[in-house]
Image (cartoon, helix red, strand yellow):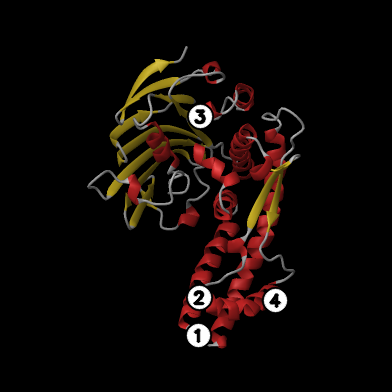
Amino acid sequence: MQITKARISRFRNIDFCDLTLSEKNHFMLGVNGQGKSNCLEAIGFISALRSFRTQLTKPLFQKNTNEFQLFYEIEHERLGITEVELQIKEKQKVLLIDGDPVKRLADFIGLFPVVPLHSGDLMILRGSPSERRRFFDMTLASVDPDYFEALRMYHRTIQERNQLLKMRSKDLAFDAFEKELARFAFSLVAKRKEGIGQISQILANVYEAFSEDNESPLLAYKPDADLASIHDYEQFFKEQRKKDLILGSTSRGPHRDDYVISLAIGGAKEYGSDGQQRGLSVALRMAQASLFESKLKIKPVILIDDILGELDPKRKESFWSSCAKDIQIIASGTEFSVGEASRNWQVWNVNAGNFKQVGASD
């Protein structure tokens, strides 16, 4: 897949820009605070109709506005030359593919894979379990529609059960919801086990390019409740009911799962050096890209938001040498450095939300 045009209107500090991205490699060059990251964020929006920098929509609107528009022209392995239009308001998203409206996210997610590398990726290692769940849920949902549906229905049923808990409903009402909840919980855990096994194997291969010694990473799934059958999950939620009534919410289940990422020295969060953690967060994203390509049969677009400047020279060179030449990369930075200069970039000067193409890099 390649994004050949991107039109951004009233997104953060970008009033309007019209980018022709017909080449494989594009570099947004400028000092901090000019709109480089905002541009990559807008381009990345096509992947799952959400920002890779924030969970909130309001910060994406320009001051005194409540709407932004995005347009993309894409050369796609399955769809050919395709146009995608997005109109995002505070409580409404309008999505068109070649002029036809798309009503369900399930029909869209995974269709236009974009993988962003940015400083926030460190939170996958250093942050709370919710950060890791968000990353792996997004990854698995993009390649498996059944996982997306199970995840969606599980969270919907959790919300409905929580309402019953707050209303202190009778046991019969809980029995019906918990039967459905158990079915989706069992499916999620099974699919997470399978998917994490695949990602772990890819990650080990990818990380070899970033390691200085024998640091083979291990990705392990830690389910909050690992039970043998749907019936066992029904009993599990029933047993939790008394405590949950006191709390007013569902305290246990797949929405409390976690993932452990470790190196030979131990857990990456606790024992990994800063360089190891940064290299591992980049490797996680590249493993995600590899999974997308193998499962979807679509080459993802890679966005690199000024993150590689935080890698040491060896890891940075290793990253660029491992990048396939036929994958589109759109990067940003305040300057060119080791590795980046080895690629033929179309360079854009970025200043106060304005983008000017200045030609190819030397």
**First in sequence: mark 3 or mark 4?**
4
Position of 165 relative to 337 (above/below): below
Q: Which residue is mark 1?
A: 169
Residue at 50 percent of width and 37 percent of height = 119
Residue 48 at least partly seen: yes
**First in sequence: mark 4 or mark 2?**
4
Q: Nearer the viewer, residue 13 or 325?
A: 13
Q: Which residue is mark 2?
A: 248
**First in sequence: mark 3 or mark 1?**
1
**Label 4 crowding class (10 Å Cα cut-off): few <14, some 14-19, many 20+?**
few
**First in sequence: mark 1 or mark 4?**
1
Viewed as shown, does residue 207 lie left or right of 99? Answer: right
Q: Amino acid at mark 2?
A: Gly
Q: Which mark is residue 231?
A: 4
**Label 3 crowding class (10 Å Cα cut-off): few <14, some 14-19, many 20+?**
many
Q: How many marks?
A: 4
Q: Amino acid at mark 1?
A: Ser
Q: Which residue is mark 3?
A: 329
Q: Residue furthest top?
A: 362
Residue 87 at least partly seen: no
Front tag of 2 and 3: 2
The reply to whether dot 3 and dot 1 touch (C-beta < 8 Å) is: no
Viewed as shown, does residue 267 lie left or right of 304? Answer: right
